[in-house]
Image (cartoon, grey):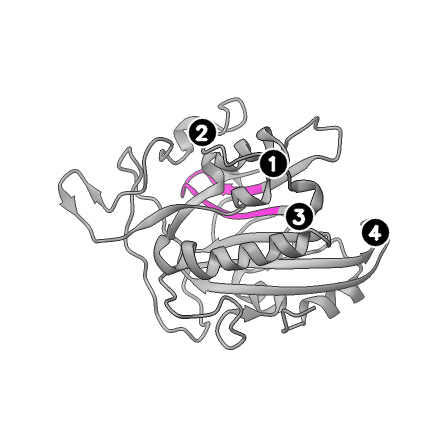
Amino acid sequence: MPAVMGGSEAVMESTSTSNLFTHTFYYGSETDSNRNYTVCYDKSARTTYWVAYPLNSSHFGSVSRTDDYEYVPSDILAQDCQVNVIGSFYSYYISSNDKGTNNYSKGHLLPSASRTNTTTANQQLFYSVNLVPQIQSNFNSGVWSTLEGHLQTRANSENLYIVTGTMCSQVNDGNGSFTPEETYDTNGVNIPAPRYFYKVVLKIGGSESNPTSATAIGFWYTNQSHTGESYNDTEKFVKSVDQIEEWTGLDFFVNLPNDLEATAEAMTTPWW
């Protein structure tokens, strides 16, 4: 799981730690190894900063997409600080006051197709905290979906560790200034639409307790249509983990031995 650069708490951007909800969901007993994902959610801003999860062949099976959109149970996270898009979609207006023409989908940070092993695992992906406003046309349905599919294919024969996250603050990434349109939930609450989406991906040799090698890569996208572009464009989208750490202020894969972490996070090619 990520940590703040120079620190140990999983925080992103400029938010009070008291507003952060960081929680791990399990699809079995919390005493076994069936960790589904860990989420870092800002209760005040009502946005998810990152979701961290393992991905390997054990996560694939015959379970269909459940589409069971639900709040996180209130004994875990109070419902009044969660985004209300359970039976609806993001909106670009309050009442009749139109704000724009966005076509944000309920973008999954951990996608449904990455958890087809059990019904419970899949259902947990439809919790409010795993959803963020994401442009659908030529992004969620385009380069982003292609990247997810590629990682799912790789995970059939490899153990991957993935962090998928969002950024609302502008960074100097060479893509110029970009401001998403406003969007709202069913209650009329303004919900931040991220400027950026990213994935950082790690593969290790050896075991979790004794890694002997490590390779990693990052992917970085603006939250807009990417028509006619390749998900693995090395000029635009493929980044080193070091670069994404610089933009986000997060320290990924901190449990690796320092020498392996330094080598892996400097890599700039996705073809491991």
Marks 2 and 3 sit apart, C-alpha to C-alpha, by 23 Å
Q: Earlier in the sequence, mark 2 or mark 3?
A: 3
Rendered image: mark on residue 207: 4
Indicate the quadrant where residue 217 lies. bottom right
Q: Amino acid at mark 4?
A: Ser
Nearer mark to the viewer, of 3 and 1:
1
Q: Nearer the viewer, mark 1 or mark 4?
A: 1
Task: Find residue 108 and report its horizontal and vertical position in percent.
Answer: 47, 45
Sequence-wise, the earlier of marks 3 and 1 is 3
Magenta-highlighted residues: 39-52
Place of residue 146 in the rendered image (x, y in percent of width and height, measured from the top left):
51, 59
Residue 55 disc label: 3
Mark 2 = which residue? 70
Query: Which labelled disc corresponds to residue 62?
Result: 1
* Mark nearer the viewer, 2 or 1: 1
Q: Secondary structure at mark 2?
A: loop
